[in-house]
Image (spheres, grey):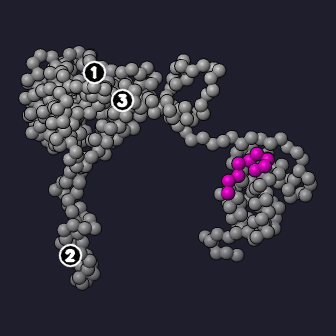
Amino acid sequence: MDRPGTHTTADDDAVGAVVEFAGRLRAAGARVPPTRVHAMIRALGELGADSLASVYWSGRLTLCASPEDIDRFDHVFAAYFSGRPERPRPRVAVEPSYQLVARPADTAGNGDQHDDEPQPPEQLATASRLEVLRHRDVAELGVAERAEVQRFVSLLVPAGPQRLTHRLRASPSGTVDPRRTVRTMLRHGGEPAELLHRRRARRYRRLVFIIDVSGSMAPYADTLLRFAHAACQARPGTEAFTVGTRLTRVTRELRMREPGLALAAASAAIPDWRGGTRLGAELKEFLDRWGQRGSARGAVVVIASDGWERGDPAPLGEQMARLRRFARHIVWVNPHRGRAGFVPRTGGMLAAIPHIDRLVAGHSLAAMEELARTLGKNEPQHLAGLSGRVMDHA
């Protein structure tokens, strides 16, 4: 007998019989992959092939993947091991396996196809609809399609950027760690031991979202808040504010784990949905109350707005220059940036562009994925100089 813990196998004759039996079981309609055949051979090696009961239970417990397979197994087993000719049995078609693909909720009723037209394979059609949905403007989506896009937005997680801290951590390389090295020497009786190293630790930079919830941004505000909620869940230090006619901090609401409850709590806390926009005044309030005290220092600030500013845009330019001195990077999300031929013409955008690092679109799921990748750059040197390129198009 083999030692415990080692694998035993059946002899060659038993292996041949198992392979032949598995073939007959497949012909009867059961799905028997090679891994299950190997499992039965190993089971016979443990139980022994000298007992019909051992063979039966070894096969039933390893070759049957569903309750329907048990009936097929009993039928084939009785015919194979009794020596009686197997009675003809109607072959049952094996269901093909499909890869699951996420499907927009209301794709069945778009009304563009006729019943007499040939239908494409379900999987390909679903993947194609999902790809089309990724690039559609969320302002043009129906309720079900918008919910599907927001579900995917909730899965986006900006991973970076990171910064060096003053805390030192053990590392395979870096400067020599004298304390750990000496302690190791003392544990070895004072004998010189291996030199241990340390290096500065890294931590994520704070993300700060300032989202415009005025009337012109209403079709995009809930999707942008959903993205901010995903960032708050992935990055504990993330801050979120909304601007309209007043500044509202919604960080505490967006820290609720369930997206629906978090968005409902944030909506209840925002008093100026679909109102006007006072970006300059609200940005000044943010810097006075939170930004200058630490929230914006060294952070990546994401401002989501179309730049429609009520009144003179000059104060917005002054506050953006002030924010520029605190923030590490400023990313401006303008949903209209994704439209062909976009040129920034609003007063707010023209006042802000000289101070931002990158102007990106936020009008679709694909644009939100690009935003997540942009925020995930550890050292986004590619942001430098883009202000000048944006100004070239203005």
Determine which residue is flagged by label 1.
Answer: 217
Which quadrant would residue 257 be assigned to in this image? top left
Is residue 363 visible in the rendered image? The answer is yes
Which residue occupies 14% across, 29% down? Answer: 352
By secondary structure, the bulk of the magenta-drawn segment is best described as loop
Of residues 55 and 202, the one nearer the viewer is: 202
Q: Which mark is residue 364?
A: 3
Please give left or right for residue 388 compared with residue 109 in the image. Answer: left
Q: Which mark is residue 182?
A: 2
Give, as a single range, the part of the protein colored magenta.
Answer: 26-34
Alpha carbon of mark 3 to alpha carbon of mark 2: how far?
57 Å
Percent x, y for residue 252?
A: 27, 32
Which residue occupies 27% across, 28% down? Answer: 337
Q: Secondary structure beneath disc 3?
A: loop
Identity, as a three-letter code, of the amino acid under mark 3:
Ser
Identity, as a three-letter code, of the amino acid under mark 1:
Met
Alpha carbon of mark 1 to alpha carbon of mark 3: how far?
14 Å
